[in-house]
Amino acid sequence: MKECKIVETAEAIRQAQLIATVTSSVNALEIIPTDFLPGAVVCDVARPRNIAEETTRVRDDLLVFAGPTLTIPGKHAALGLDIGFPPGETYPCMAETLTLALESWTDDYSLGRYLRMEQVEEIVGLAKQHGFHNAGLRNNDTAITPEQIAGVKERAEARRKKGGP
């Protein structure tokens, strides 16, 4: 297994093939499209997004996707809110809240910075029991298809052969 590091510098991004951005910043991070290696896979968990939309327009050899969305259980499930997803899909934080409500949980569950892996595993298990499941990858609120992923891979390999970012 390759090394995994938690870093706070753009220089580290220039060396990484797999990147997750998780901040509470209200603006995109100061990372420019050429900071990424060809074929880098970037999971932009933060809302608002950390990776500027311009990056994916300029770099078609990167796979940039938002943090996961989940499908709400039930044939006609919808929250009645326009959060930029198709009806019946939601953020994991909302799915956690819904799962806890389905469990009649009344105490705090995951407030604060120090979340234990056991808590994560427990809430994932409970969510699965209630029928929540991964809705697939999205970028800029649009579903990413397997064909798009294959195209990114092809363009990344071509860019690597040319030797540029």
Image (cartoon, rainbow, N blue to C red):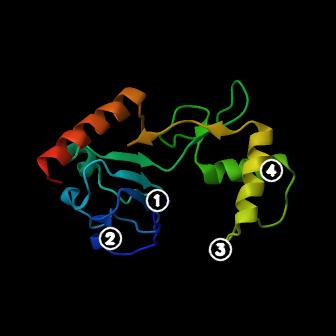
Upstream in the sequence, badge 4 or badge 2?
A: 2
Tell whether label 2 touches label 4 (CB within 8 Å).
Answer: no
Query: Which is closer to the viewer, label 4 or label 1?
Result: 1
C-alpha separation, residue under disc 4 versus residue under disc 2: 40 Å
Tags 1 and 2 in contact by the CB under 8 Å rule? no
Q: Say which amino acid is labelled 4.
A: Ala
- What amino acid is labelled 3 in the image? Gly
| SS at badge 1 | loop
Question: Which residue matches tag 4?
Answer: 101
Foreground residue, 1 or 44? 1
Give the residue at x 40% y 59%: 19
**Residue where numbered disc 3 is placed:** 112
Q: Quadrant of residue 118?
A: bottom right
Q: Is residue 22 left or right of residue 124?
A: left
Residue visible at 57% across and 31% down?
Answer: 87
Three-letter residue code for mark 1: Ala
Closer to the chain start, of discs 3 and 4, is 4
| Residue 150 in which image quadrant | top left
Image vertical order of residue 63 relative to residue 142, above or below:
below
**Residue under label 2:** 12
Instruction: List the single residue furthest toward the right.
Output: 104
Q: Residue 98: x percent and y percent?
A: 73, 47
Q: Is residue 60 visible?
A: no
Residue, disc 1: 46
